[in-house]
Amino acid sequence: MNKIRFAKLFIYLALILLVVICFIPFYMMVINATRTNSEILQGFSLVPGTAILDNYTTLISYMDVWRGFLNSLTVAVSVTILNAYFSALTAFALVVYHFKWKNVIFVTFIVMMMVPGQLGLIGLYDLSEALGMLDTYWPLIIPAIAAPFTVFFFRQYLITTMPMSLLEAGRIDGASEMHMFHRIVIPILMPAIATMGIFTFIGSWNNYITPLVILRSPELFTLPVMMGALRGSPVATNLGAMYLGIAISVVPIMIAFLFLSRYIINSISAGAVKG
Amino acid sequence: MAKTHRKAYLFIAPFVIVFLIFNIYPIFLTFYYSLTNYSGMGGIANAEFIGIANYARLITDAYFYEAFLNTIKIWGFNFIVQMLIALGLALLFSDIRLKLKGVGVFRALFYLPNIITIASVAILFNILLDWNHGALNQLLLSFGFIDSPINWLNSPTYAQSAVALIGAWMWFGNSFIILLAGISGISRDYYEAALIDGANWWKSFTNITLPQLKPILLYVLITSIIGGLQLFDLPMLLTDTRGAPQGSLNTMVLYLYNQAFKYNNFGYGATLAYGLFIITVLFSAVTFRAMYRKEVR
């Protein structure tokens, strides 16, 4: 018994050490965001400095990080809503109705889930140019309407949870199909929408290559593209401001995660066992 | 009861239309470009159709092989480290004798780096690993682990290892959660029966845990391969965006991006996209077969 206790103590200490190691990069980021450039050049420190406001002024004078924040939010929220609504509509149609090519559509989904996103990137760029959509958010947002993986996930969810009798009852009462979709199907799908919504949002928020290719104007840059541009910018001469810029792009997401972590992790666990 | 309904077509129409225009069409367009010398500017009409010349170039392109090897090396090192940590943690937290507490908290803490923007992480490590004023060298110097600063991002070995380890740091939490869920799903009866038969820990690990975990391991492996072959943000932004030092961080997607969008070579960039696609399919297929062959035996 004592042996197990000792082992457990050792394991807990090792786990805490691992957590500390995992958080050192973030810790250094936050600490250095509060120090002056010359302080950072002189050496590392574990205690914060006092230069955070100066760093903020420097950063903001060259790069509007909050604008990037707003841009990322605009794109990610639009993507998440379109992805959820149209995937639900498509999954609903696939589950409830019979029609031609149902199987063709389904097989196409499975194949498309394995295709790397970069395969059509060059084509997407040229298509956007032809449609006059280059340097706009449309090429980043519109494709969210057609998300095979989300449709697949919603379809599986609907098959197991939706009682068809509910729809039959609705039809007898004279409700239109669209009305039933909004009033019956969407509420039933809500847990699945929340799960996929979180991952869609994170995916869009962190996406780098597509906005990098599509966007040209700095005022349209999403946060990842802005971060990529940070190093070549005048901000790079002030390391404190540089660290602060990175911290602003990272910390709010960490805080949001604190509130959603239980939910996110349970979804991953559940997905793994089913998959 | 499923029934035929005209509205069904209306409901799937947005998906189908957007899918055809924004997914399928760009993929075919990219394929068409791969058969031309299109630069990406001045319209495709001015480009020449050159057949499979780009593909001939691809299979003899030393840079492509280098990019492929770089990607595989980084992914391989990353995967080994990531899986060792994740599997070790999953075994610890599922051990019935230890009954460790705080799974929820540790899972959340280890998962956190997964949701951070990779571009931000890359820029952060670009300055943390800086030769002159990077925090890592300052830390090692002040503790006396090293006598003079190490130029991490100037050495191909260190730079590739850095990408692999940063990746492991970011993603081990995800693998840990998936593996832990998988192990927790294995019936206790197997272990109890093994215990009665006098099997030791290693025996039950290799004869029960690993075989039962196979579908989950396959899932982790394949998603890791597909993700690993697409490695882009981290190697691009960790150094000079062109794969320095000495091209060691030039991954396949970075090569594709630079060819198409920096050197205005859409035709060859498109060919690289198809090369990457074929490699991805081959790797997934080989992994899938290798994992399931033994069962047929």
Image: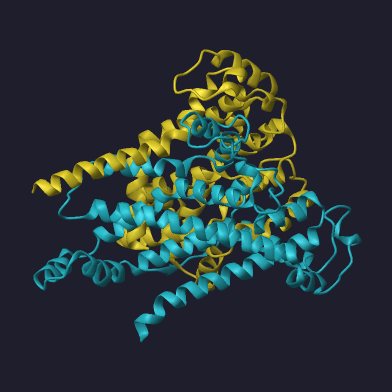
Residue occupying image coordinates x 17% and y 49%: B99
Q: How many marks?
A: 0
Residue occupying image coordinates x 25% and y 51%: B93
Give residue B158's position: percent from left, percent from top. 58, 48
Residue occupying image coordinates x 38% and y 62%: A156
Describe residue A151's horizontal placement relative to residue A75 as left or right: left
Give residue B82's position: percent from left, percent from top. 43, 54
Q: Nearer the viewer, residue B274 or B101?
A: B101
Residue lying at the far right of the rendered structure: B46
Whether residue A126 is visible here, answered yes or no, is no
Describe residue A99's horizontal placement relative to residue B21 as left or right: left
Colour in which chain B is drawn: cyan
Colour in which chain A is drawn: yellow
Quarter holding residue B124:
top right
| Image quarter in which the C terminus of chain A is found | bottom left
Say above or below: B220 vs A187: below
Give residue B147's position: percent from left, percent from top. 55, 35
Residue lying at the far front of the rendered structure: B147
Residue occupying image coordinates x 45% and y 61%: A152
Give residue A179's position: percent from left, percent from top. 43, 49
Describe residue B175's horizontal placement relative to residue B61 as left or right: left
